[in-house]
Image: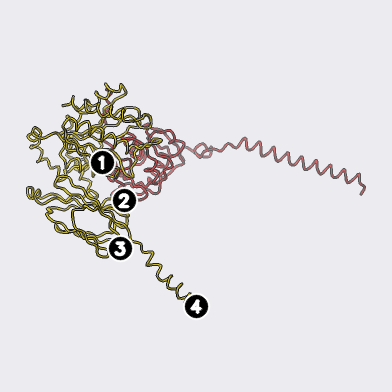
Chain colours: A red, B yellow
């Protein structure tokens, strides 16, 4: 084979390689633009029946504010309760929300025979709580109200921290007793002087 | 020589578990309030949890799960003796013993009532265990029996008024944190300033804590009620830039058992009007002094709802947004004092 033929073959090979490269690059690039990650609830394959809408009550501006959060369908009440607690503490939802401690993990959730719902949270709920009496009240009642609004088959809620019963979370309210009766007291509004 | 070395190493390995069995430290402290002597033993969680207690009116025997070292104040009023894992506290003149195992920090608390006072009230009392019985919140502790109340107005004219001031948080519970200060410390400083201002007016003061120490809500309630105060004030920081004066929340009376069981307002019910009037008077005085936002708020705070006296919880504007030097603290203390005076 002459030197001229060799050169021609080399040019052809370079051309084919460049064409193939640009084809694959363009293909991937254009697909990446199209493939915006869809959340499970936005997926066109998911029907309305596959969704559970949670009502989460979070403290904002000195009161509880309800937001709706769509999650993939959960059937058992325990799974829904788990989702409620996870969504309650989830960032960035919880960022900037007054009185919600950051980085809190749900360690466990279970019901006993008396239908008492135990929620076991990581120690961050205590360590990262920085608030006054109102913040603590709103945090505890937000958790309770969020659970009551989404799950019906429990009598009361008891909060544990790292599997243990604490006397108080932030030094203002008892944590060693179930939450219902302490938090369902009808509060009168503030009186400004 | 080689054999000796091997023997030495083997001996060392065999003896090492003995060295590993380190003696745990148990610290003992005590305090006296009226006719009640409180003895507290503090140590590690498991050490306290697994301790066995046997008490009589003349001695308390505590068997710990392992060897321990006792650290106690030199002026401890009872004799103590140690025998292996056993601690014996020998006592005299004790009429009643109440024992509590508490957590965070783990501790055993003995409330020892002196004999001469218990002779007066021999009526049977319900067994109260603060850790196990939720209805403790509704039931007055022995020191707070309502029967003692009618004597108060007669005594009030003869003796100076007693104020119980509670510095919120303390010990491992820091409260709200600012760059260089902690709420627990500021609460204590403000408490002392308010105490000084009230003392100057001839009042008697009792502080639930005088130093940086952990106190549970229940301990504060017991301490507060045991003094039968004229007024109870708890001091905390707000998270906002406003003064907030809290009173307890009194529910409508209910006959439902479950509501009664958890009702937090049994003790405070008969004082609530006075507590509201005091909150308003203090709030007005703070407003006049600081021109800041001042609100009064009702909330089912256990420390207020369980208090058997006129009781308020005052939150000063957040320490994250304000500087509390001595001058500022004096202003706060004097404004509260003026509020109390106008309430009277």
Res A20 seen here: yes
Q: Are marks 1 and 4 on the same chain?
A: yes
Name the spot of residue B206 as percent of width and height, x first: 20, 39
Q: Are marks 2 and 4 on the same chain?
A: no
Alpha carbon separation for disc pair 2 and 4: 67 Å
Dot label at residue B1: 4
* Label 2 chain ID: A
Circle 3 crowding by C-alpha within 10 Å: few under 14, some 14–19, many from 20: some
The relative height of residue A70 versus residue B75 in the rendered view (above or below) is above
Dot label at residue B210: 1
At 31% from the left edge and 49% from the top edge, which residue is drawn?
B105
Q: Nearer the viewer, mark 2 or mark 4?
A: 4
Q: In front: B90, or B143?
A: B90
The relative height of residue B38 versus residue B205 in the rendered view (above or below) is below
Q: Are marks 4 and 3 on the same chain?
A: yes
Name the spot of residue A28 as percent of width and height, x first: 66, 39
Dot label at residue A137: none
Q: Is residue A189 left or right of residue B7?
A: left
């Amino acid at each position: 084979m002459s030197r001229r033929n060799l050169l021609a073959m080399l040019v052809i090979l370079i051309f084919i390689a460049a064409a193939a490269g640009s084809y694959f690059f363009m293909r991937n690039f254009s697909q990446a633009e199209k493939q915006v990650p869809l959340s499970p609830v936005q997926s066109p394959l998911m029907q309305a029946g596959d969704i559970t809408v949670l009502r989460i009550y979070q403290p904002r501006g000195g009161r509880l504010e309800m937001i709706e959060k769509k999650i993939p369908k959960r059937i058992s009440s325990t799974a829904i309760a788990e989702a409620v607690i996870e969504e309650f503490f989830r960032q960035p939802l919880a960022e900037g929300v007054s009185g919600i401690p950051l980085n809190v993990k749900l360690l466990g959730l279970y019901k006993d025979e008396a239908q008492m719902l135990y929620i076991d949270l990581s120690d961050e709920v205590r360590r990262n709580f920085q608030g006054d009496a109102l913040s603590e009240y709103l945090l505890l009642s937000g958790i309770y109200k969020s659970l009551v609004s989404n799950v019906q088959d429990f009598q009361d809620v008891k909060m544990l921290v790292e599997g243990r019963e604490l006397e108080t979370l932030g030094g203002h309210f008892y944590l060693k007793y179930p939450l219902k009766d302490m938090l369902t007291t009808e509060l009168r509004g503030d009186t400004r002087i | 020589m080689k054999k000796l070395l091997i023997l030495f190493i083997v001996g060392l390995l065999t003896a090492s578990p003995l060295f590993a069995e380190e003696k745990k430290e148990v610290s003992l402290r005590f305090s006296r309030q009226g006719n009640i002597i409180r003895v507290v033993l503090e140590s590690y969680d498991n050490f306290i949890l697994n301790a066995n207690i046997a008490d009589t009116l003349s001695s308390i025997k505590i068997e710990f799960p392992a060897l321990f070292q006792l650290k106690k104040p030199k002026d401890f009023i009872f004799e103590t003796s140690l025998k292996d894992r056993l601690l014996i506290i020998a006592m005299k003149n004790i009429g009643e013993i109440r024992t509590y195992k508490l957590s965070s920090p783990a501790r055993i608390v003995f409330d020892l009532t002196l004999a001469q006072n218990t002779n007066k009230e021999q009526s049977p009392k319900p067994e109260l265990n603060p850790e196990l019985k939720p209805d403790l919140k509704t039931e007055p502790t022995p020191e707070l029996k309502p029967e003692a109340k009618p004597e108060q107005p007669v005594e009030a004219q003869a003796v100076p008024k007693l104020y119980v001031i509670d510095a919120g948080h303390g010990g491992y519970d820091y409260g709200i944190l600012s760059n260089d200060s902690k709420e627990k410390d500021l609460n204590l400083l403000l408490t002392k300033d308010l105490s000084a201002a009230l003392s100057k007016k001839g009042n008697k003061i009792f502080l639930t804590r005088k130093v940086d120490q952990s106190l549970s809500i229940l301990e504060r309630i017991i301490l507060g009620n045991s003094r039968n105060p004229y007024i109870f004030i708890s001091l905390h920081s707000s998270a906002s830039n406003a003064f907030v004066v809290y009173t307890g929340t009194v529910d409508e009376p209910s006959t439902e058992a479950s509501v009664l069981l958890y009702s937090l307002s049994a003790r405070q019910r008969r004082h609530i009007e006075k507590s509201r009037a005091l909150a308003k008077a203090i709030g007005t005085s703070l407003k006049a002094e600081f021109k800041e936002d001042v609100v009064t708020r009702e909330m089912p705070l256990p420390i207020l709802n369980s208090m058997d006296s006129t009781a308020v919880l005052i939150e000063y504007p957040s320490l994250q947004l304000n500087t509390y030097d001595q001058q500022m603290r004096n202003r706060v203390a004097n404004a509260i004092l003026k509020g109390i005076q106008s309430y009277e």
